[in-house]
Image (cartoon, coloured by chain):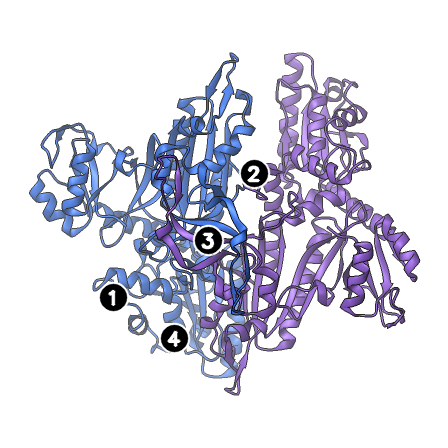
Chain colours: A blue, B purple
Amino acid sequence: MNNNYTIDTMAEISNKEVTNREEDYSKWYNNLVVKADLAEQSAVRGCMVIKPYGYAIWEKMQHELDRMFKETGHQNAYFPLFIPKSFLSREAEHVEGFAKECAVVTHHRLMNSPDGKGVVVDPDAKLEEELVVRPTSETIIWNTYKNWIKSWRDLPILCNQWANVVRWEMRTRLFLRTAEFLWQEGHTAHATEAEAIAEAQKMVGVYADFARRYMAMPVVVGHKSETERFAGAVDTYSIEAMMQDGKALQAGTSHFLGQNFAKAFEVQYANKEGKLDYVWATSWGVSTRLMGALIMCHSDNNGLVLPPALAPIQVVMVPIFKTDEEKAAIVARMEQLKKEMEAKGISVKLDNRDHLRPGFKFAEWELKGVPVRIVIGPRDLENGNVELARRDTSTKESVPQEGLAGYVSELLDTIQNNMYEKALEFRDSHVVKVDTWEEFKEKIEDGGFLLCHWDGTPETEEKIKEETKATIRCIPIDSCVCEEEGKCIYSGKPSKRRVIFARAY
Amino acid sequence: MNNNYTIDTMAEISNKEVTNREEDYSKWYNNLVVKADLAEQSAVRGCMVIKPYGYAIWEKMQHELDRMFKETGHQNAYFPLFIPKSFLSREAEHVEGFAKECAVVTHHRLMNSPDGKGVVVDPDAKLEEELVVRPTSETIIWNTYKNWIKSWRDLPILCNQWANVVRWEMRTRLFLRTAEFLWQEGHTAHATEAEAIAEAQKMVGVYADFARRYMAMPVVVGHKSETERFAGAVDTYSIEAMMQDGKALQAGTSHFLGQNFAKAFEVQYANKEGKLDYVWATSWGVSTRLMGALIMCHSDNNGLVLPPALAPIQVVMVPIFKTDEEKAAIVARMEQLKKEMEAKGISVKLDNRDHLRPGFKFAEWELKGVPVRIVIGPRDLENGNVELARRDTSTKESVPQEGLAGYVSELLDTIQNNMYEKALEFRDSHVVKVDTWEEFKEKIEDGGFLLCHWDGTPETEEKIKEETKATIRCIPIDSCVCEEEGKCIYSGKPSKRRVIFARAY
């Protein structure tokens, strides 16, 4: 085969396109999202367009999550986009958290402009009560559940919805923080406190499982501190991941809402003894923010690196030839191999575009993070081999065409595991125990998770944030290394466990 | 088995719940949607809550349609919920059709009310330009495509999005006409007129295929008249179904948009000769309105009748017993049979709720339209039989447990076909050729499709609508019975083909 097109050449080509992550991580990220055709800014402030390649990854995430939700007994439903303004005020903390920066619908009609130029808002079409585009749906859903719940027999209610939500963020970044984003929100209703807590824990567990198995992304599961809790929740659980710049990213949250929303919307049920009691609630969600996490957890200076479990294209095939005869023979062989791989459930793209050089194609598919590239040139065809390149390790090898599908199938599993191990190793090498304030201020500049004692007060948390921009990411629950007595790094007061401090997205 | 619980008893029970469709078709429909747990009105005017059972049917529709779109080369993407007000004015006809009744976002913040009661709109947070919640996305999408298209190599673009849209309807009905509804909208860009027309035709064909094969609903494919055309389209194709009251329901539309949106948003491409030309466009969509069509096409006074291809539960199993021993033995046998059916891809619900009588369960699952009910009582268990009831024909038979899964699998196909044939027979028996204005005025009162000659002018169409409330549903293209010369029923002027007039939802 033509050895002009090697991994090194590819790196050169794509280096010209994507900023180096060591130079400017933030710019590298923005650049990559756009260059890899994942998403772009729209004409509407803070709203993104999710392009087909990006949406295909999101669809794979949705598909797995939806299956996991259904396997844990949940059903999908759909609730209104709009929330009457007054609903937001019903739950005292919730309104503080969500009513502020939101899209407010005040009118229901446009009319031709009196000056004949375009359209203007019709002043006669003012709504009696303004509607807010949902920033989250607890209020409208609990107002609905009120009519669904009479007795213990109606419980639990285990609903999820896939929807768009809007939060009027001032500073936006593609996938990480956008005014409109896509998400799922689970909303469950239970007869007992214990059952609701168990549900909230179960769902944060589902998120952790999803992150690890499909995104190949290690996460810590923990409680949020009071300050970082969801507005209206009694307890918030989250999964926290570490990005390659050492910053933390909250990738999913699950809330135990106590009876707060049931009380705000008067949702009571008759228990087995016939007595009325308020219903217990949870809510939980992940969003298109996961796309940002996926990108920043694995990708490199040559582009995306996608875990096989979420890659829309798992294998790309590129023929190399000089003559039409060579092309015909190679493409024919590739078609056969493609069918064999597809029969094993592998998604394969044969890139036989005529007007592009192989080197250009290599760089493009590398940029798009396709896990495996298979190349056949005239000599490979003769020898019965293919040249196979792995995106995660940038290694190449010659592999027999005979049995290729089985080989690739196993290789995809290997890549999936390798990506997780690599990310885990990175994460673990950036978790440090810190015991003094001086050390904290020094170490936080290097990024990573700092395991520290904290006195448990919002005041100390706030001071630490002011001085270092670090926040408590979580109080870990799935790791016992944190359960030890000590003294708060800031106040010196006694503490029973370490918590994770980090700077975060 | 206990013969107290027969089909007749069921009918009695559910008759008490659902209005008779012969008495009041409209009330029957509303009643059924709510009683069968499909959807309900929300606290927000004109917006519905789609309940889990209704949503499960919609998900099945989505699943099949999405597969069909992908098989025809389309990819999903996602575009913003909001459209800048000025975008709507760019295409002259489009703004007339869509800018009028819509949700207008004017502010981006709420603040605590000065009187301390709740929240009010913050007057300082007025948007520079108002945003409209998308009623349809041609404008924002073509503004985006402008940046995606440079040369003929970038074409075609074949995108679809699954989304919510809002049209501020004054009179709403669950599924049929709601302020917010769920839909998919395909938006494609092509280098040539012929290719765009072929695409619009292909997609209306996909819709017709979906309606017939999955919804078991016969449809006529045709062109819309100029009056009924999509605002901004050069030509609109639709599928038109007939409901049981003889009224027509437009179940899907596909538009050839010419170069209208390309011109409005300045989208040009360099052709193979290097010359610039405007891009050709289509758009096409179906919505949760299909749920209304599905219900009104098949259901009866006892409740929903769902085609097996879209039924969330295809088979319900109800045990009948007197003693705990009988229950244990029957349920154990049912679990085995359930597994056998599930292995054949059949979705089965075993209803072993303790506190409900079998008759109540029969009525409930009949109301919910489950295609097949299987009952085992002590004698059936002894004899190795089950009692099997079909929802579509209300017939019962005794079937051996041995080989039940295979039998049911074939039966589900039979039911699917039977439902289509029954609906087709009904439809065809309500299509009449009408040649005089007197006859038209008389026949239109009976409902059905009237095949008539029309002079092709919007004026005549408007007069007929004013006098009879009937509109031209379509100018059929998949049937040759209409291609004949004649005279317009209203004006007497010459006509080359018949069109379909009907009253419509």
* B279 over B114 or under it: above or below: below
| First along the sequence among labels 1 and 4 | 1
Mark 2 crowdedness (10 Å alpha carbons): few <14, some 14-19, many ≥20? some
Which of pointers 2 and 4 indicates the residue nearer the eye?
2
Q: CA distance from mark 3 to mark 1?
A: 40 Å
Q: Which residue is mark 2?
A: B42
Q: Chain for mark 4? A: A
Q: CA distance from mark 1 to mark 2?
A: 51 Å
At label 3, the amino acid type is: Val
Q: Are marks 1 and 2 on the same chain?
A: no
Which of pointers 4 and 3 indicates the residue nearer the eye?
3
At label 1, the amino acid type is: Asn
The reply to whether residue A432 is visible in this rendering is: no
Dot 3 and dot 1 residues touching (CB under 8 Å): no
Q: CA distance from mark 2 to mark 4?
A: 54 Å
Q: Residue furthest left?
A: A438
Q: Which residue is mark 4?
A: A360
